[in-house]
Image (cartoon, grey):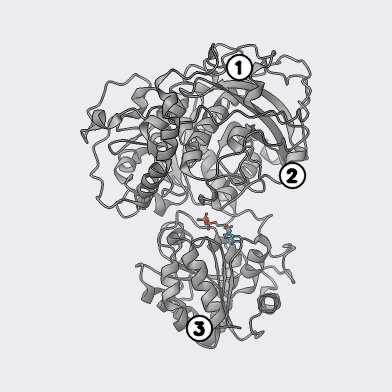
């Protein structure tokens, strides 16, 4: 997973242009829409006809780019009086306030949180600080009950307009042949990114590949995503208007526009939640001040949209903190609505990112009841609420992306201060390792490569890719050199401090290093420096370039993944599939997917080291070099073994399907 680069902090511009002609102007300005007959999507009677709704008709003209309706200033500029929580929250071990029956999460044993602020905590702290001025600005609004609409109708919804509209199939669904005998389940994926619409890392890959694989296992899958302005225009143009309604949000006293734009591809339905106030920024993630309201809105709107579309899934599968409130909403505000009968799964792609902010703000935006803010649920420390923690407490199952990581996060070293909470919920926690999409990652058909190859001819054709890569990057063209690739976000997580410390020893005259990535300036500058001082042997590509990544996987001999922690990791899987041997630290998914090479038996897939130590990394690289230069026959055997290894989604998707079945045994 990934993310979360705090890019621009500038406020959203309001009244931004509607990007697509088919798009309804998603603005609060539409609030006055005469059609808005109040229907309470959230609290819709459970008895409401649930399944095949012949929803009303009214061919709704996709509000063609009605001039960009002026967006109201960001919802009642946020932070209503940060109510003085602290006092209330004083005792560390909060006594279990009596909980409503359905408020599942019980009071957890107080976990002694280590003193040192974990990165997640730090982040929140800094963000909180950052938010301070905003609070001030908004303070005046706090005292009065939000001055908004005189009649703040809780949730105003238009009648579902889509019944007669043929489901807008954009691309053809895959044939249903294979799946005939498998039990059928319906699943709604809810997450913040998905290739090819928007991707900042592994989460985007998973949101793309897993639903497609599940369709092949007779699942009916809808993926619900924010409709970010940065989604490429070619996809925006193919989205079809599916409906719209208005929804209240937290204690803002306002009703927010929720548009649903649909796109169907390979049997997977993608529903994009449209609202320009929240999603008009260029990047999916900006900073917590903006992201907290954004994902409170998104989580609630996603569930409301399911009710609105009358598509009630068996399972709601949400991903990471951005969808962390979904299980909480499901068992509180939505418990008595049709969607309330779905079971929920929360997958943690990276525990480092948790969505932490002060309780008043999250209460304000989410509107969740007080009991959701207990210590065993959202409450984190004295005064913060943690969206991921709440999701873990309320979800029926929690998964993470490898078995080893599932175990590691229950320890203080990797638990990012939630290890106690995770241990408490360990009964519903499990690890399922990611796979890679073989259509997207296939050296036999990959259009980015100069020469395609497969298991049968890798030894002849990989060399051509190596020479082409050297040429492309200005390295000395020499097939005898050992080429090490590194494709990564350049952050602390990825073990780059270890790499930095040993580069001079690695560059021994017979070795070349290629780095592709963006991230912390410190690392970007370090790698640029080495490119300058070691021209012809070190290449620093400080960029995000999908095609170049493919060429490095194909042209390098080995790929470095020395992560400090790695929930699953996809780069080592891509590398193996392209016949490039991984050199990895034995942690998380790296440990689960790369078996260490044994020079005596010849077994294994790559070179590994255990402790987080630069010397051990150098040792692993040297072992790889020794094998490459002195025992090429065995090296080539491992190349072929790795290409042959099944790292597809097939296996993993089956495990997810089993989990869905386990949760829905009627
Ligand atoms: P993360 O922690 O970033 O999610 P993963 O290994 O799970 O790490 O996934 C990273 C994905 O992003 C891989 O598919 C990798 O090829 C891709 N990737 C990372 N950095 C770049 C880059 N600079 N250019 C192109 N692709 C990249």
- Residue under label 3: 507
Q: Which of 183 and 334 is in front in this view?
A: 334
Upstream in sequence: badge 2 or badge 1: 1
Q: Is residue 493 above or below residue 99?
A: below
| Front one among 167 and 489 | 489
Q: Does the residue labelled 3 lie within 8 Å of ligand 1?
A: no
Residue 24 as seen in the image, left or right of residue 115: right
Q: Earlier in the sequence, mark 1 or mark 3?
A: 1
| Dot 1: element | loop
Q: Which of the two marks, 2 or 1, is nearer to us in this view?
A: 2
State whether residue 657 appears in this view: yes
The residue singled out by tag 1 in the image is 50
Q: In this view, does 491 lie to the left or right of 229?
A: left
Residue at x 20%, y 33% (from the top left corner): 91
Q: For the residues marked 1 and 3, what is the alpha-carbon distance in whole angstroms?
A: 65 Å
Q: Mark 2 points at which residue?
A: 233
Question: Does residue 623 appear left or right of residue 47 in this picture?
Answer: left
- The quadrant holding residue 270 is top right
Decide which of 546, 437 is in the foreground and name it: 546
The percent position of residue 581, horizontal first and vertical second, equals 54, 71
> Against 402, is 471 above or below?
below
| The label number, if any, that marks residue 310 in the structure image | none
**Percent coordinates x, y for residue 398 in the rendering:** 43, 39
Q: Do tag 3 and tag 2 residues touch (Cβ < 8 Å)?
A: no
Quadrant location of ligand 1? bottom right
The spot of residue 299 in percent (x, y) is 52, 32
Q: Which of marks 3 and 2 is nearer the N terminus?
A: 2
Q: Is mark 2 within 8 Å of ligand 1?
A: no
Q: How far apart are marks 3 and 2 (CA)?
A: 44 Å
- Cα separation, mark 2 vs mark 1, equals 34 Å
Residue occupying image coordinates x 50% and y 22%: 341
């Amino acid at each position: 997973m990934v993310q979360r680069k705090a890019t621009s902090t500038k406020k959203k511009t309001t009244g931004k242009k509607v990007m697509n002609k088919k798009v309804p102007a998603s603005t609060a300005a539409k609030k006055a829409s005469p059609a808005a007959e109040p229907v309470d999507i959230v609290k819709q009677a459970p008895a409401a006809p649930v399944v095949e709704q012949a929803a009303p008709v009214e061919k709704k003209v996709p509000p063609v780019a009605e001039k960009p309706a002026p967006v109201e200033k960001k919802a009642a500029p946020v932070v209503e009086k940060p109510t003085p929580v602290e006092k209330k929250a004083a005792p560390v071990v909060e006594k279990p306030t009596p909980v409503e029956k359905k408020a599942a999460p019980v009071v957890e044993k107080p976990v002694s949180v280590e003193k040192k602020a974990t990165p997640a905590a730090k982040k929140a702290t800094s963000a909180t600080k950052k938010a301070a001025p905003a609070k001030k600005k908004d303070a005046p609004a706090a005292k009065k009950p939000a001055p908004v609409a005189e009649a703040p109708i809780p949730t105003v919804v238009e009648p579902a307009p889509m019944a007669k509209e043929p489901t807008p199939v954009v691309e053809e669904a895959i044939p249903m042949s294979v799946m005939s005998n498998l039990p059928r389940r319906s699943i709604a994926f809810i997450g913040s990114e998905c290739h090819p619409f928007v991707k900042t890392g592994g989460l985007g890959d998973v949101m793309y590949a897993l639903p497609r694989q599940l369709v092949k296992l007779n699942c009916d899958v809808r993926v619900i995503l924010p409709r970010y302005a940065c989604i490429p225009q070619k996809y925006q143009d193919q989205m079809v208007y599916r409906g719209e309604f208005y929804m209240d949000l937290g204690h803002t006293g306002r009703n927010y526009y929720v548009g649903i734009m649909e796109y169907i591809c390979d049997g997977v339905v993608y529903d994009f939640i449209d609202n320009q106030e929240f999603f008009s920024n260029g990047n999916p993630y900006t900073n917590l001040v903006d992201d907290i309201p954004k994902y409170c809105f998104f989580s609630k709107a996603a569930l409301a949209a399911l009710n609105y579309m009358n598509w009630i899934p068996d399972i709601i599968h949400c991903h990471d903190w951005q969808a962390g409130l979904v299980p909480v909403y499901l068992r509180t505000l939505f418990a008595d609505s049709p969607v309330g009968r779905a079971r929920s799964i929360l997958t943690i792609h990276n525990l480092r990112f948790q969505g932490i902010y002060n309780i008043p703000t999250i209460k304000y935006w989410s509107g969740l009841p007080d009991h959701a803010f207990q210590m065993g649920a959202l409450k984190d420390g004295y005064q913060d609420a943690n969206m991921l923690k709440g999701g873990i407490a309320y979800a029926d199952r929690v998964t993470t992306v490898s078995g080893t990581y599932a175990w590691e996060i229950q320890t203080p070293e990797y638990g990012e201060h939630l290890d106690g909470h995770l241990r408490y919920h360990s009964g519903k926690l499990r690890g399922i390792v990611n796979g890679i999409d073989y259509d997207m990652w296939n050296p036999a058909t990959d259009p980015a490569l100069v020469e395609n190859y497969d298991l049968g001819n890798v030894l002849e054709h990989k060399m051509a890719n190596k020479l082409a890569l050297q040429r492309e990057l200005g390295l000395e063209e020499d097939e005898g050199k050992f080429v090490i690739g590194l494709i990564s976000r350049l952050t602390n997580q990825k073990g780059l401090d270890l790499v930095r410390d040993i580069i001079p020893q690695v560059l021994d005259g017979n070795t070349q290093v290629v780095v592709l990535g963006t991230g912390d300036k410190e690392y970007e500058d370090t790698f640029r420096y080495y490119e300058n001082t070691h021209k012809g042997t070190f290449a620093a590509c400080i960029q995000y370039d999908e095609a170049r990544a493919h060429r490095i996987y194909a042209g390098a001999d080995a790929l470095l993944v020395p992560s400090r922690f790695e929930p699953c990791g996809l780069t080592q899987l891509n590398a193996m599939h392209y016949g490039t041997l991984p050199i990895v630290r034995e942690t998380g998914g790296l440990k689960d997917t790369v078996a260490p090479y044994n020079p005596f038996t010849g077994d294994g897939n790559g070179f590994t080291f255990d402790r987080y130590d630069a010397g051990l990394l150098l040792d692993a690289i040297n072992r790889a070099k020794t094998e490459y230069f002195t025992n090429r026959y065995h090296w080539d055997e491992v190349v072929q073994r790795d290409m042959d290894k099944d790292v597809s989604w097939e296996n993993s998707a089956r495990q997810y399907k089993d989990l869905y079945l386990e949760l829905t045994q009627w």
